[in-house]
């Protein structure tokens, strides 16, 4: 079994390009990290600390060399809910306990990687991914309505909708103007200029410059940010909150894993390389664990930052590490100056993030998709917005699997044929002619391809009413995979036929299927002479022996 390599190979061959990629990505990441920190309720510094620690350790230990990690929109939405639910019960220690959930999530991710579960996280159906990503985009947009109107936002979508009519009666026009200008700036700034000056940083600088010319208190700002290395925070747990912490940790770990590995696929397409899913989970887990110890937001592979890094030259894990070190240098030297950044500008940046997260191409094709697929996407979207993400994903995956099983069963049943002597085509093959000559005394049941548990139910329906034969040949020559449920159905078939004094002949049974049937006791009463390698031998045996 291939083991997991815990360190990326460190080479300075591409260091100049990695430095350019890491520096540019840090410039893009700074305003986003500040915005995510504010939106989470933990403060702007928590967003930057998350970008620093998750970005550094995920790059060093992860399995996607050019990937840049840090707080993302989906992770921020979940983390805001975690802080809100915990602080409602523990107002004084809520933030610290929330970061304890981040530590647990990181440990779970490391466990996912060690158990080699990486390949399973990207098996989530696209309709489910589209539904919950679109739902998260909607949540991000709605949660910024308060700050962009000049009011203190809420981390709850329902609370935001409840306060929204009241906010509309007391709009701060200075905040709204800055917010709308920020949205216009990130959309209208020429894309080719983003390499030299990313649009989020541009609107952040211009918005802050505008605030300096306004009377103090005119617009809401993020306030002072500590210009020091964060202190170590030991996890805090409470027995009455253990269930909530574990639930939050599982949700964060699963979401971070899906988000990161999907971004890894994007990186693979751009770099023409192949990432290591299990090592990526370990790297993300280490990053989130360390971030939790230093009061940083949890993160994941960030698609936009990863694309910027690759397009500006980043090739190895050095680029992600350099991105984190640049952010650390900014925090240590310029944190005191960031307090003048207006919340409305950050809200405008996040509204752009939310709009980008929404899966517009899928929504545009919704009317052209099969009804069950479109309904599944809308259901997951609704559950994400109004219930919670983990419920949305679990329900979506369950329903999607049921739909898939039903479709596969229909396809597999096309490979199940029951013949009892009726000639239904003008050019019958030798087997059809032989069955016709038996005048209904012999029936042939042929099973081919993979046979899942869903085939058993359909097979019973097909056999119902066919009781006139004296001998049934069960031909498994073309069966590639016989599931346990189908083996049990065959066991039931054999016992039922023998109970009615009818002969059963098995053809082409594999060693595995034979072992399953023996374990079930189905072959206990079956004569060894009634088992054949090929169908022709069974037919000759009936002609020769007669089986009367």
Image: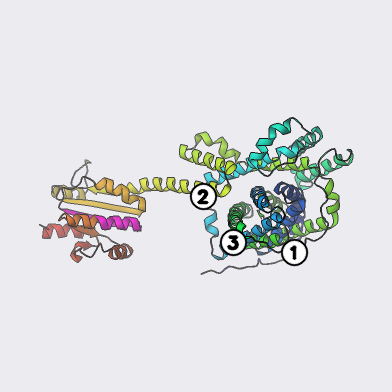
Q: Nearer the viewer, mark 1 or mark 2?
A: 1
Residue interval drawn in magenta: 469-492
x%, y% of residue 79? Answer: 66, 51
Residue at mark 2? 394
Q: Nearer the viewer, residue 46 or 311?
A: 46
Residue ID at (60%, 59%): 275
Q: Earlier in the sequence, mark 1 or mark 3?
A: 3
Residue ID at (20%, 57%): 504
Q: Nearer the viewer, residue 197 or 540?
A: 197
Q: Image check: 514 left or right of 280?
A: left
Q: Residues within 10 Å of mark 1 (few under 14, many from 20)?
A: few
| Residue 108: numbered disc | 3
Residue at mark 1? 232
Q: Image check: 28 left or right of 424?
A: right
* Disc 3 to disc 2, C-alpha distance: 18 Å
Q: Secondary structure at mark 2?
A: helix
Q: Earlier in the sequence, mark 1 or mark 2?
A: 1
* Disc 1 to disc 3, C-alpha distance: 21 Å
Q: Secondary structure at mark 1?
A: loop
Q: Secondary structure at mark 3?
A: helix
Q: Nearer the viewer, residue 482 or 417?
A: 482
Q: Is residue 471 magenta?
A: yes
Residue ID at (26%, 64%): 521
């Amino acid at each position: 079994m291939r083991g997991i390599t815990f360190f990326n190979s460190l080479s300075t061959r591409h260091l100049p390009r990695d430095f350019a990629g890491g520096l540019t990505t840090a410039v893009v990441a700074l305003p986003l990290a500040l915005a995510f920190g504010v939106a989470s309720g933990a403060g702007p510094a928590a967003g930057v600390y998350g970008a620093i620690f998750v970005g550094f350790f995920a790059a060093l230990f992860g399995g996607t060399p050019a990937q840049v990690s840090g707080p993302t929109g989906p992770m921020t939405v979940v983390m805001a809910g975690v802080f809100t639910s915990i602080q409602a019960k523990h107002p004084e220690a809520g933030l610290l306990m929330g970061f304890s959930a981040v530590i647990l999530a990181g440990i779970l991710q490391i466990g996912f990687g060690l158990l080699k579960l990486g390949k399973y996280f990207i098996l989530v159906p696209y309709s489910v991914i589209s539904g919950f990503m679109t739902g998260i985009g909607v949540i991000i947009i709605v949660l910024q309505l308060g700050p962009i109107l000049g009011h203190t936002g809420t981390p709850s979508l329902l609370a935001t909708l409840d306060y929204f009519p009241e906010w509309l009666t007391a709009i701060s026009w200075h905040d709204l103007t800055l917010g709308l200008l920020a949205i216009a700036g990130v959309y209208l700034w020429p894309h080719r200029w983003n390499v030299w000056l990313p649009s989020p940083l541009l609107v952040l600088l211009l918005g802050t410059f505008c605030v300096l010319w306004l009377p103090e208190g005119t617009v809401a700002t993020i306030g002072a940010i500590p210009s020091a290395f964060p202190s170590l925070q030991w996890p805090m747990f409470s027995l009455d909150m253990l269930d909530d912490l574990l639930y939050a940790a599982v949700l964060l770990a699963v979401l971070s894993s899906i988000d990161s590995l999907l971004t890894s696929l994007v990186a693979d397409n751009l770099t023409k390389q192949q990432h290591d899913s299990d090592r990526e989970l370990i790297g993300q887990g280490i990053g989130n664990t360390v971030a939790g110890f230093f009061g940083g937001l949890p993160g994941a592979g960030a698609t936009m930052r990863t694309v910027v890094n690759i397009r500006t030259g980043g090739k190895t894990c050095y680029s992600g590490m350099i991105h984190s070190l640049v952010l650390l240098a900014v925090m240590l030297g310029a944190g005191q100056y960031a307090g003048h950044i207006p919340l409305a500008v950050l809200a405008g940046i996040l509204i752009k993030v939310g709009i980008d997260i929404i899966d517009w191409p899928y929504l545009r094709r919704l009317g052209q998709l099969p009804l069950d697929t479109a309904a599944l996407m809308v259901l997951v979207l609704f559950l994400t917005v109004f219930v919670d993400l983990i419920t949305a994903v679990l329900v979506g995956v369950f329903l999607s699997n049921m739909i898939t099983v039903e479709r596969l069963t229909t396809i597999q049943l096309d490979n199940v044929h029951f013949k009892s002597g009726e000639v239904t085509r003008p050019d019958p093959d030798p087997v059809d002619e032989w069955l016709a000559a038996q005048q209904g005394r012999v029936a042939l049941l042929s099973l081919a391809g993979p046979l899942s548990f869903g085939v058993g139910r359909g097979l019973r329906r097909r056999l119902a009413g066919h009781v006139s034969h004296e001998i049934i040949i069960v031909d498994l020559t073309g069966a590639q995979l016989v599931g346990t449920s189908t083996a049990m159905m065959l066991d039931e078939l054999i016992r039922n036929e023998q109970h009615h004094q009818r002969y059963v002949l098995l053809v082409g049974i594999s060693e595995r299927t034979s072992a399953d049937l023996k374990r079930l006791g189905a072959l206990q009463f079956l004569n060894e002479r009634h088992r054949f390698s090929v169908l022709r031998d069974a037919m000759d045996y009936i002609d020769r022996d007669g089986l009367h």
